[in-house]
Image: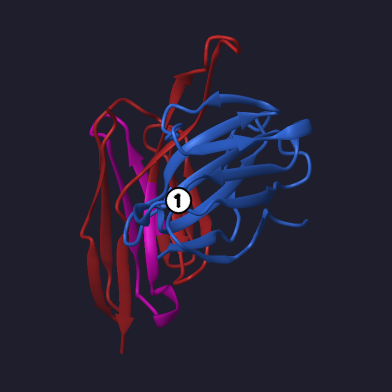
Amino acid sequence: ELKVEQNPLFLSMQEGKNYTIYCNYSTTSDRLYWYRQDPGKSLESLFVLLSNGAVKQEGRLMASLDTKARLSTLHITAAVHDLSATYFCAVDILVLRVANAGGTSYGKLTFGQGTILTVHP
Amino acid sequence: EAGVVQSPRYKIIEKKQPVAFWCNPISGHNTLYWYRQNLGQGPELLIRYENEEAVDDSQLPKDRFSAERLKGVDSTLKIQPAELGDSAVYLCASSHEGQILYEQYFGPGTRLTVT
């Protein structure tokens, strides 16, 4: 069974500081997603990482993937209050379809527990 | 482009009552997912459809949960009878299998409270 673990689970940051959220997973995969969720809202896609060594950046957030270490990181640079939210990583694996459909496909996401990020002045 | 639409947004029912949730995916997305998100946790996949076929329902509690996706577009998830432990947010997502990314787009969710 695939396990996805994030740490830390809670992160209180000062504005302007840098920090990293880690996402470890237990089985081979080269597809990983990062999502953001604001309170009471749905999940917003941040990054899609599709290969070993992939690095994506958007504003103050940068995500990377090391498939050999089974590790992804989400780095926050010079945090601002607007980044306060819960961040999830999700690992995607190839799965067999049920017998009457056959074949394999991606799309079976396993999510981490989430990291609640609070940025304060 | 309109996003994934779900209704209702909130539902409060007593235990042992039935409940149904509806989802309309993004136009052209052939794959549809139902997830359950318990408080303080990440979403867990319940069922995945490709067109009208359920290709992964291994995590759907089939004794009380059922789902359908008629005509390969809208989908309904039903719980009958509901139990206290079913209180959660039920998320629908969709993706286009033809896209390399397989990126899933999530709806706003239905928050279910069972009393």
| Above/below status of B37 relative to B70 | below
Can you see residue A15?
Answer: no
Is residue B60 a member of the stretch shown in magenta?
no
Query: Which is nearer the eye, A114 or A78?
Result: A114
Residue ID at (53%, 58%): A44
Type of amino acid under label 1: Ala
Residue A91 in percent (x, y) is at 39, 38
Residue B55 in percent (x, y) is at 56, 23
| Above/below status of A113 relative to A115 | above
Query: Which is nearer the eye, A8 or A110?
Result: A110
Judging from the image, what secondary structure is the residue with disc 1 in? Answer: loop
Q: How is the image coloured?
A: by chain
Residue B81 relative to residue A102: left or right: left
Residue A45 in percent (x, y) is at 53, 54
User: What is the number of callouts on the image?
Assistant: 1
Can you see residue B40?
Answer: yes
Residue ID at (44%, 72%): A39
Q: Crowding at label 1, few (<14), some or many (≥20) Cα neighbours within 10 Å?
A: many
Residue B57 in percent (x, y) is at 49, 28
Q: Colour of chain A?
A: red
Magenta-highlighted residues: A62-89
User: The chain drawn blue is chain what?
Assistant: B
Residue ID at (31%, 76%): A118
Numbered disc 1: what chain? B
Specify the quadrant of the image occupied by residue A116: bottom left
Disc 1: which residue: B82
Q: Quadrant of the C terminus of chain A?
A: bottom left
| Above/below status of A35 relative to B96 | below
Q: Quadrant of the N terminus of chain A?
A: top left
